[in-house]
Image (tube, helix red, strand yellow):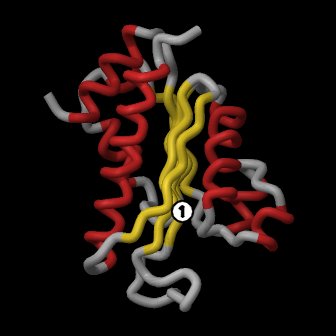
Amino acid sequence: MTLCEKILKKLAELNLTLGTAESCTGGMIASEIVSVPGASAVFKGGVVSYANEIKRRVLGVNSETLEKHGAVSGECVQEMLAGACRTLNVDCAVAVSGVAGPDGGTAEKPVGLVYVGAVVRGVFAVERCRFDGDRGRIRAQSAARALEILFELTFKHGSCR
């Protein structure tokens, strides 16, 4: 059984719904989720918020957060998670924002810096990650880590009411 299958099975058992808010992964997480037969019982949808305008307008990320911390920040990802739950009307969400490269990195935010997170029933977990490799590898590692965090939260906090 794949990680996605385990997550979806557990969320279905708990009668919880799931959504995604993705930036640098561009829908990879949602694609992996919907590759599982029966995902529609749990997965309601996702937002690919590549532009800050979409992060603000659709997910409700505060302009001040983007100005002070930037899109590649734990603060932004936390607000993306909350926005996904609100916008998609779901109990759980995953979110990712980072620099996949090969361009766009800075000294403070180099290529491979990605913030990934999940929320399950109001319990948030956001991590700062540094991934190596080319753009495809960074995106794949980001998606995989986001699902791992969701898995950890689902099995730790999912049954809490």
| Residue at 30% over, 18% down | 9
| Residue at 58% over, 84% down | 108
Residue 158 placed where, x, y %? 47, 18
4 relative position to 72: left or right: left
Asked if residue 7 is positioned above or below residue 101 in the image, the reply reads above
Q: Quadrant of the N terminus?
A: top left
Frontmost residue, 5 versus 124: 124
Q: Quadrant of residue 147?
A: top left
Can the viewer see residue 20?
Answer: no
Residue 42 placed where, x, y %? 43, 21
Asked if residue 110 is positioned above or below residue 100 in the image, the reply reads below
Residue that lies at the very extreme toward the left in this rendered image: 1
Identity, as a three-letter code, of the amino acid under mark 1: Ser
10 relative position to 62: left or right: left
Q: How packed is label 1: few (under 14 Cα within 10 Å), some, or many (20 or more)?
A: many
Q: Secondary structure at mark 1?
A: strand
Residue 123 placed where, x, y %? 59, 30
Can the viewer see residue 94?
Answer: yes
Q: Which residue is mark 1?
A: 97
Residue 116 placed where, x, y %? 48, 54
Q: Quadrant of the C terminus?
A: top right
Asked if residue 122 is positioned above or below residue 46 in the image, the reply reads above
60 relative position to 72: left or right: right
110 relative position to 62: left or right: left
| Residue at 51% over, 47% down | 117
| Residue at 85% over, 65% down | 64
